[in-house]
Image (cartoon, rainbow, N blue to C red):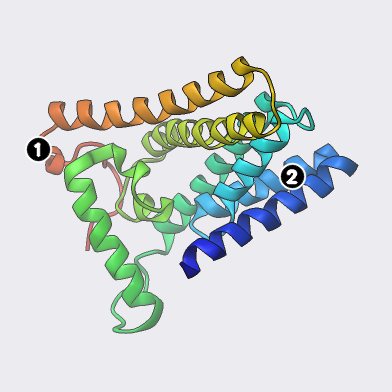
Amino acid sequence: MGRRRAESGRWTITFSLLLATATADKATTFLALFAAQMAAWAGIPAIGAAAAGAAGALASQGTLHLWAVLVVGTAGAEVGSLGGWWVGRRIARAGLDGEEGSAGKRRQALAAGEKIELKWGRLIVFFVPSWVSGALGMSFRQFATWNLLAALLWNVGAALAAYGVASAASGHSFPRVVVPLVVAAAAAWATARMFRAFRRRHPHSHKGAGVSGGQPRA
């Protein structure tokens, strides 16, 4: 219950901030969206989902262009993820010998990430923080490519779902309500289908699918 209230409050604050900047300066609004997505995908607790939803709702009211919301949100997510990957690649494994604090948490996250990697290979970018992919040794090119797909699908789903719901609440025409919701559902369906297809084709991805040329594992 408390978590739901926190998420609701976070979304409300984000929407208010984006609305305030949108009415004054769209460039500032997009900068806020970019920064929120970048921080969230870098692995820092942030308001990426709320920002995408709020921006999608603003786009439904004509305050922002929907295509710009998708481009900026995806770009911010990709940049943040690449930063997280770099951190994981360079320093995530440093000081893992400690028993408490951040070392213990990072060790647990890496262990969980390795289990997911064994099952999903390169698709771990959909499941784990970006720094975990870097720490597990996924190559830059592979990570950047698959993470871009993940960021795009995620932003399309979040922004268009909010766009459709906000359009319905505002009494907009049927197509403006249904089409975004259908596209958002299609993005979710495509992601789920990709998971199933990859699992069928790579039932033994523990042999290293998708993770190459990187840091040796601990």
Quadrant in which the C terminus is drawn:
bottom left
The residue tagged 2 is 31
Along the line of sight, the residue nearer the viewer: 112 or 66: 66
Tell me the amino acid under the disc marked 1.
Answer: His
Q: Is residue 25 left or right of residue 67?
A: right
Q: Tell how many labels.
A: 2
CA distance separating discs 2 and 1: 42 Å
Rendering coords of residue 3 (x, y %): 48, 66
Q: Kindly identify which numbered label has been placed on residue 114.
A: none
Residue highlighted by disc 1: 204
Would residue 45 be visible to someone looking at this image? Answer: no
Expressed as whole percent of the image width and height from the top left, the position of residue 13 reads: 70, 58
Give the residue at x 31% y 63%: 109
Element under label 1? loop
Q: Residues within 10 Å of mark 1 (few under 14, many from 20)?
A: some
Which amino acid does the dot numbered 2 rest on?
Leu
Give percent across and percent down for residue 122: 29, 38
Mark positioned earlier in the residue sequence (2 or 1): 2
Q: Quadrant of residue 199?
A: top left
Asked which secondary structure carries label 2, the reply is helix
Q: Residue furthest front?
A: 171
The answer to whether residue 71 is left or right of residue 190 is: right
Residue at horizontal 55 percent and vertical 64 percent from the top: 5
Q: Nearer the viewer, residue 128 or 11?
A: 11
**Position of residue 169 in the picture relative to residue 105 (left or right):** right
Residue positioned 36% across, 55% down in the render: 132
Q: Nearer the viewer, mark 2 or mark 1?
A: 2
Closer to the camera, 76 or 17?
17
